[in-house]
Amino acid sequence: MKEQVNEKKTVSKKFIIAVIVSVVLVASFIAVYFSYIKPEHEGAIVTYSKTVQEYTVAMSNFDAKCEQFQSVNSRLENEIIDLQDIITYGGEPYDKNMIVLANDAINQGKIAIKEVPVLDFERGVKQVEEFFFLQVNAIKEEDSIVKEKTEKLNKLIEEIEIPDYSEVTTGINTAQTNLENSIRQLEQVTAPSESFVLGRIMEIKDEAGMIDVIALTEDTDPENLIGKNGWYTSKIIFRHKDVKHYGLDNGLKTLAEIGNPAGGCVETYATVVDAERRNQELTDMEGTVRSPGAHFVCGTMVVRISEDMKTSTQNILLEMIIDALLRLEE
C-alpha cells in the first residue's frame, strides 16, 4: 500500500515537472518570439516593402523612357513609310534622280533607327504576401535580388539617350518635298493646254528679250501639222531681239511663216513618245543647213531656240523657258 502511494507521488511529481518544463518552454518561445523573431520578421517585411516600392518606381521610369524612345522611333518609321508610299504610288517624277535621292534618304533613316533598350532580367518580383510566416532569410535574400534589379534599372535609365533624328528627318522631309514637287512638275508639263504654255512664256517675255509671242492655229500653221497624228497639238512661237531677219524686218513675212528661226518656239505633243521622236529628228538635223538650234524635251513639249543666236544666248534662253514651264504655283 505504501509503495503504491509512493509510486503515485512519483508520477505526480513527474507530471508537475513536465508541466513546469512545458510552461517554461512555451514562455521562453513566447519571449523569444516577441523579443527577437517577431521584430526581425516585421523589420524584414518593412525593408522589403520599401525595396519593392523603389523597384516599382524605377521600373515605371524605365518604361516611360522606353516609351519615349519608341515614340521617337515610330515617328521616324512613319516618315520613312510615307516617303516609300510616294515612291511606290505617287506617280512618276520629272527628274528621275528624285527617286534615287528619296531611296537614299530612306536608307539613311533605316540605318539611323536605334533599338529600344531591353532588360536582361525578369521583370517580376515577389510580393510581401507571397512569403510564409517566419521566412525572414527568404525575405532578406529576395530583398537583395530586388535591390540589385533596381540598381541595374537606375543605371540603365541614366545610360538611355533618346535618339535625335532631326538631321535624318530633315533629309527625309526634303527628299519627300522634292519628289512630290517633281511629280507635280511632270504632271504640269505633260500635254499642257495651249493657254498654260502661252501664259508661262508671256511671264518671261520681257526678261527673255522676246519682241513678239504668238500661238499658231490650224489656219496660220505653215506646215499644217497642228493636231495631226504624232505631231504637235499646239505651237507657240516667239521673236527675239537678237535675231535679225530680212523677211520680218521688211514685213515680207509674218512671224508664223518664219517660225523657229525668228527666235524660238515651244511645240506641245500628246505623248512623251511623240516629243522624243520629234527631238530626235531635230538632233539628226544638227550640223546641216537646216540646223535647228538648241532644243530640249520638257515633259511632252519640245522647246526650241533659233540657231541664229549665240550658243550662250541659246542656252540661257532655253533654261529660262524650261524653268518657267516647270515653275510650280504655291
Image: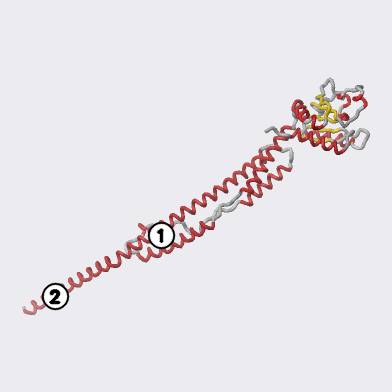
Going by the numbered disc 2, the residue's amino acid type is: Lys
Quadrant of image for the N terminus: bottom left
The correct choice, above or below, for 137 with respect to 91 in the image is: below
Q: Quadrant of residue 229?
A: top right
Q: Nearer the viewer, residue 20 or 13?
A: 20
Percent from the top left, x then y, of residue 288?
93, 35
Q: Residue at the location (13% across, 74% down)?
A: 12
Circle 1 residue: 51
Residue 79 x %, y %:
61, 44
Q: Along the line of sight, which residue is nearer the eye, 194 or 89?
A: 194
Residue 128 shown left or right of residue 273 in the figure: left
Residue at 44% across / 62% down in the picture? 147
Of labels 2 and 1, earlier in sequence is 2
Q: Residue furthest bottom?
A: 3
Q: Amino acid at mark 1?
A: Thr
Q: Which residue is mark 2?
A: 13
Residue closest to the far top: 219
Q: For residue 117, which numbered disc appears in the image?
A: none
CA separation in Å, label 2 and label 1 = 54 Å
Tell me the SS state at disc 1.
helix
